[in-house]
Image: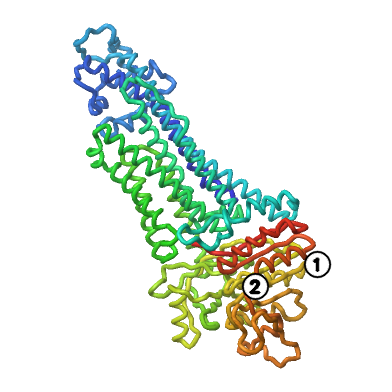
């Protein structure tokens, strides 16, 4: 059901827009008949056709209805909506009964005068049949014009269709890996993973951003984005139908400018729901595909860019047409034009401010500005198309609905987690703090879970920050989830300062939103390599605890934790003892990148004998009692290569650490993948903004 709900969010706008496209097709005859009436108004005593007269004068209305019944009797039922649209502001009470009466009265009484019976300059107080030649030439032009508008509508929906196809492939791939992760073990699938799915687009940097370019997508992400951009380029470049001479003397160049403007505007609008959907935390496609929020963020940014480029071309083309037609100055006074320019400008500012360097510099300020501008962008777009009833507001309504749904679910999640919670915090080591949060009974914990926490402090209560959580089996903490956070700047610095002033402990009130994240099915693999870097141990710990609990026969579990110094041993001392104590079969090793404090040389391994007199109290905890500590920075190529080459079957590699470490592990898995006798899968726990 959740998958159906996500699919409906995308397809609802397509169905609604199809209705608008049908309306445009219907209106060809209406506009042509109006032109036909315009050509004969002098015979009815008018110098020229104006809407106010056309909407209230029975003669003009009867001429118009006669044209419709003569040339397009099957489409007469559409007249009522069109007349309401065109004449609603001129006092005409438009309804089917009134228009039928006017037409039937004119025909039954013989009131309608045939055009070919009149001489030039003659006037009659009666409706006149339209100029059929002008009607046909006008109809030909309007079919071309609105045909191009309809093409733009369907091409925008084609962009939606492309992403539906991408999502479908992702869902099928995810289901195959969840239901039977070892079913696709063969040389070809490992080849696909090695060369398409896993590697960064170029080089090995993916999690760690490039200096100016930002995050580099994986190769498969880049392919998806490339085909999105290619499809967009093709759709705005092909399939135009123009002709000259035409009844309105519109040149080939002017037609090209106008048609390109229509198409790019419609394709831009079609992409707005995708922009909102892929930026949502509560995007049900995250669950359906098994892709991370970071993956959808990649697509969100690139679709936003193509949407803006389309909108910019749309605006530039209409500006060119305004200059050519000498109406630019007057149009700049029209609300639809002003708000259209405003929306395009806001979109450009949003895309510019989303540059990774600016976004990373002060993310919370960026996010606040981003949301603020997004509201005005939607308002600008809505007024742009709605003030003159152009249509196409369905795209915006769907986007607003998606945003409201995401925000509503966030509030629901906070409520289900107990609302405002009094939560004990404590410092662990120099720059890490621990929080014990009461877990809601409305959801079951799973490895890989993370929550967003709102800390009620004056300087950041509106901010939400993601934290990976794990469960503790310590007495008194069975109903809690635990988070560890490293102190940086912003809210984490504020929390650490408060705890320092309170002697290292203190209670803070928080809202908890979650859970989010995926559980990676590492338990289904013969060999599992878990690699943690620093505070990333919070994610790895949960998987290690679960694998120990399962105690699957023949499964080899290897954990490598890379830390800066011995201060890290104070973060989870009791959890490590529980994990590695007793009859644990987990191969656990700690890499410490700075030289040991006492004795020995960097690069040595150290492990205390069980006979050494060491207390297990937290303040005297020494990890060397239960695992090895190696005093050097590990080479991930070596660590990963050894595990994969020694494996007898399938291998899962899960990493959670600093971006550079994640990239090293990813690159190492890719290099050694085809050397494995079975399937090799790479999983990554990371947050990227």
**At x 65% / y 48%, what residue is drawn?**
172
Q: Residue beneath label 2, please?
A: 634
* Image vertical order of residue 436 relative to residue 531, above or below: below
**At x 50% / y 53%, what residue is drawn?**
278
Q: Quadrant of residue 631?
A: bottom right
Q: Which mark is residue 296?
A: none
Q: Secondary structure at mark 1?
A: loop
Q: Residue beneath label 1, please?
A: 554
From the top left corner, tell me how far across and down residue 22 is, in percent: 45, 31
| In the image: residue 39, left or right of residue 589 | left
- Can residue 19 be seen here? The reply is no
The residue nearer to you, when weighing 193 against 505, is: 193
* Number of residues whose C-alpha sits closer than 10 Å to that of mark 1, classed few (under 14), some (14–19) or many (20 or more): few
Q: Secondary structure at mark 2?
A: loop
Instruction: Work out which residue is located at the far bottom of the displayed protein and give it.
Output: 613
Q: How many numbered markers are drawn?
A: 2
From the top left corner, tell me how far across and down residue 284 is, in percent: 56, 54
**At x 61% / y 46%, what residue is drawn?**
168
**At x 47% / y 30%, what residue is drawn?**
239
From the top left corner, tell me how far across and down residue 566 is, in percent: 60, 83
Pick whichever of labels 1 and 2 is earlier in the sequence. 1
- Mark 1 against mark 2, which lies toward the viewer? 2
From the top left corner, tell me how far across and down residue 148 is, in percent: 42, 30
* Image vertical order of residue 665 relative to residue 255, above or below: below
- Measure the C-alpha gap from mark 1 to mark 2: 27 Å
Colour theme:
rainbow
């Amino acid at each position: 059901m959740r998958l159906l709900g996500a699919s409906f969010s995308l397809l609802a706008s397509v169905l609604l827009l199809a209705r608008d496209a049908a309306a445009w097709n219907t209106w060809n005859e209406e506009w042509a008949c109006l032109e036909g009436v315009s050509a004969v108004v002098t015979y009815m005593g008018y110098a020229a056709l104006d809407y106010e007269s056309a909407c209230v004068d029975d003669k003009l209305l009867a001429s118009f209805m006669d044209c419709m019944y003569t040339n397009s009797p099957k489409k007469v039922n559409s007249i009522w909506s069109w007349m309401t649209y065109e004449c609603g502001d001129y006092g005409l009470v438009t309804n089917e009964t009134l228009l039928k009466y006017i037409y039937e009265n004119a025909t039954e009484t013989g009131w309608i005068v045939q055009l070919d019976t009149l001489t030039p300059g003659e006037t009659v107080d009666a409706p006149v049949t339209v100029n059929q030649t002008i009607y046909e030439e006008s109809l030909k032009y309007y079919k071309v014009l609105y045909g191009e508008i309809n093409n733009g509508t369907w091409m925008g929906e084609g962009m939606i269709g492309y992403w539906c196809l991408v999502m479908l492939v992702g869902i099928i791939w995810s289901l195959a890996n969840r239901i039977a992760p070892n079913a696709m073990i063969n040389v070809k699938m490992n080849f696909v993973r090695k060369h398409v799915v896993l590697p960064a687009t170029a080089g090995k940097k993916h999690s760690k951003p490039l200096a100016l370019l930002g995050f580099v997508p994986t190769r498969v992400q880049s392919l998806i984005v490339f085909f999105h951009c290619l499809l967009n380029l093709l759709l705005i470049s092909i399939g135009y139908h123009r002709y000259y001479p035409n009844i309105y003397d519109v040149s080939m160049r002017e037609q090209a400018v106008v048609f390109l403007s229509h198409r790019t505007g419609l394709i831009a609008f079609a992409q707005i729901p995708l922009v909102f959907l892929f930026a949502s935390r509560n995007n049900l496609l995250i669950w359906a595909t098994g892709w991370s929020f970071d993956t959808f963020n990649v697509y969100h940014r690139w679709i936003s860019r193509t949407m803006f480029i389309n909108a910019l071309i749309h605006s530039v083309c209409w500006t060119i047409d305004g200059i050519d037609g000498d109406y630019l100055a007057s149009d700049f006074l029209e609300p639809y034009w002003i708000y259209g320019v405003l929306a395009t400008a806001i979109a450009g500012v949003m895309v510019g401010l989303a540059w990774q360097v600016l976004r990373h510099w002060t993310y919370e300020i960026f996010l606040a500005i981003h949301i603020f501008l997004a509201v005005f962008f939607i308002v600008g777009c809505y007024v742009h198309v709605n003030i003159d009833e152009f249509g196409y507001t369905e795209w915006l309504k769907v986007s607003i609905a998606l945003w409201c749904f995401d925000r509503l679910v966030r509030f629901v999640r906070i409520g289900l987690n107990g609302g405002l919670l009094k939560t004990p915090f404590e410092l662990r080591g120099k720059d890490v703090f621990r929080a014990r949060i009461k877990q809601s009974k409305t959801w079951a914990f799973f490895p890989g879970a993370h929550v967003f926490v709102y800390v009620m402090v004056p300087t950041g209560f509106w901010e939400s920050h993601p934290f990976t959580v794990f469960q503790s089996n310590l007495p008194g903490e069975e109903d809690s989830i635990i988070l560890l956070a490293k102190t940086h700047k912003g809210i984490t610095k504020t929390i650490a300062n408060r705890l320092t002033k309170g002697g290292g402990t203190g209670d803070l009130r928080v809202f908890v939103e979650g859970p989010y994240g995926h559980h990676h099915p590492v338990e289904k693999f013969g060999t599992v390599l878990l690699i943690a870097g620093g505070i990333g141990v919070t994610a790895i710990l949960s998987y290690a605890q679960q694998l120990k609990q399962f105690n699957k026969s023949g499964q080899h579990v290897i954990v490598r934790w890379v830390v800066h110094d011995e201060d890290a041993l104070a973060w989870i001392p009791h959890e490590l003892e529980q994990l590695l104590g007793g009859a644990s079969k987990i191969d656990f090793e700690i890499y410490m990148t700075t030289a040991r404090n006492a004795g020995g040389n960097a690069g040595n391994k150290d492990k205390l004998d069980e006979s050494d007199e060491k207390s297990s109290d937290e303040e005297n905890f020494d990890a060397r009692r239960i695992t090895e500590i190696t005093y050097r920075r590990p080479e991930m190529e070596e660590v990963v290569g050894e595990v994969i080459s020694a494996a007898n079957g399938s291998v899962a590699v899960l990493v959670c650490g600093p971006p550079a470490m994640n990239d090293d592990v990813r690159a190492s898995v890719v290099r050694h993948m085809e050397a494995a006798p079975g399937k090799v899968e790479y999983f990554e726990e990371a947050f990227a903004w």
